[in-house]
Image (cartoon, rainbow, N blue to C red):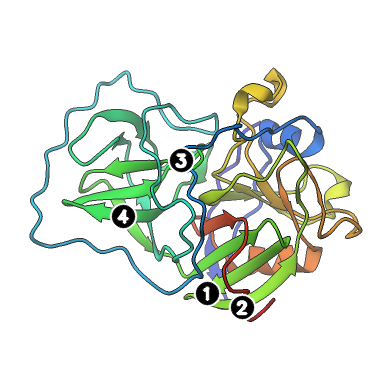
């Protein structure tokens, strides 16, 4: 089952999204307790995280712009399945500096492995009918790096043109060791919640990702509150049964709060119903989510 089109709109100063049908793979990932096992070695994982501070990604106006090589028509298209390989590692995957802008493709757009580098895939304006907005992580030589959807800790480089720049005011930071989710606006902590995270062998993936879209809860056990589907996927897709290939990590509620503060999920991030409702009302798709082990300084809302 595919996402139906979602059209975020403003109501009384907050972002609200129309309900969208849940992808079958996301349902399976939430319902079936199969292993979402991280890789035993993680060469692209930095080991430290900094406290969030307001910032924006800038570039030098003096840099020349490398030309974009023509993209072959047969390149794969990034969709809800795991993204194609060849994209570079996000060198700042554990950086909690807020990403304040997003890129929304306005047409089919080739994504490259470096400024002036090799085209690896196409990005469409939507994924499964959901408008795609990717946080901007870097700018260099006239090119723009975004967090790659359907992948973990990877960037895609975009040449000039073909996308709109969208302001992003919010960020979510999840700390695994203390089971805490904190919502930030303009770099300032607004609220924190205790969360449940992935159990041993199915750990919630570390690093920067983003909110891809939202979906109604697939079953009553999810507490009757919409689910956020993230751009993140299981760290080791090969450990997931065929029926779960392509599943994404989600942020969702549960029918009770008995297991908050524990590692009991299949990799998803579980919080209270009131907390999820507040995030759904305030935080738009495209906003960045960073999963770290622990911030050096607890947020003031902890």
Q: Are marks 1 and 2 in contact (CB under 8 Å)?
A: yes
Q: Of discs 1 and 3, which sits in the foreground?
A: 3
Q: Secondary structure at mark 2?
A: strand
Vertical side of 185 occupied by 203: above or below? above
Q: Position of residue 102 (x, y in %)?
A: 39, 57
| Quarter the N terminus occupies | top right
- Of labels 1 and 3, earlier in sequence is 3
Q: CA distance from mark 2 to mark 3?
A: 30 Å
- Of labels 1 and 4, earlier in sequence is 4
Label 3: few (<14), some (14–19) or many (≥20) C-alpha neighbours in 10 Å: some
What label does residue 44 carry, if any?
Answer: 3
The residue that label 2 is drawn on is: 190
Q: CA distance from mark 4 to mark 3?
A: 17 Å
- Of labels 1 and 2, earlier in sequence is 1
Residue at (16, 30) in percent of width and height: 69
- Of labels 4 and 3, earlier in sequence is 3
Q: Secondary structure at mark 1?
A: strand
Residue at (68, 32) in percent of width and height: 37
- Of labels 2 and 3, earlier in sequence is 3
What label does residue 89 carry, if any?
Answer: none
Q: Is residue 284 left or right of residue 193?
A: left
Q: CA distance from mark 1 to mark 4?
A: 20 Å
The residue that label 4 is drawn on is: 138
What label does residue 185 carry, if any?
Answer: 1
């Amino acid at each position: 089952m595919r996402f139906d089109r979602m059209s975020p709109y403003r109501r009384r100063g907050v972002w609200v999204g129309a309900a969208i049908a849940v992808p079958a793979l996301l349902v399976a990932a939430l319902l079936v307790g199969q292993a979402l096992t991280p890789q035993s070695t993680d060469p692209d994982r930095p080991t430290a995280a900094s406290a969030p501070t307001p910032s924006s990604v800038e570039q030098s106006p003096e840099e020349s712009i490398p030309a974009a090589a023509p993209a072959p028509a047969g390149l794969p298209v990034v969709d809800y399945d795991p993204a194609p390989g060849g994209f570079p590692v996000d060198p700042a995957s554990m950086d909690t500096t807020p990403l304040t802008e997003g890129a929304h493709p306005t047409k089919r757009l080739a994504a490259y492995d470096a400024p002036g580098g090799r085209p690896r895939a196409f990005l469409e304006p939507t994924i499964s009918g959901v408008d795609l907005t990717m946080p901007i992580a870097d700018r260099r030589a006239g090119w723009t790096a975004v967090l790659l959807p359907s992948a973990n800790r990877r960037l895609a480089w975009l040449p000039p043109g073909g996308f709109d720049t969208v302001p992003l005011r919010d960020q979510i930071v999840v700390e695994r060791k203390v089971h805490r989710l904190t919502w930030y606006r303009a770099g300032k902590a607004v609220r924190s919640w205790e969360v449940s995270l992935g159990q041993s062998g199915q750990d919630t993936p570390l690093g920067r990702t983003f909110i891809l879209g939202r979906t109604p809860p697939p079953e009553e056990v999810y507490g009757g509150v919409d689910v956020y589907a993230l751009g993140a996927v299981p760290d080791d897709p090969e450990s997931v049964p065929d029926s779960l290939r392509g599943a994404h990590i989600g942020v969702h509620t549960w029918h009770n709060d008995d297991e908050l503060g524990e590692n009991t999920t299949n990799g998803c991030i579980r919080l209270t119903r009131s907390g999820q409702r507040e995030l759904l009302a305030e935080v738009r798709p495209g906003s960045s989510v960073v999963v770290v082990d622990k911030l050096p300084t607890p947020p003031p809302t902890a």
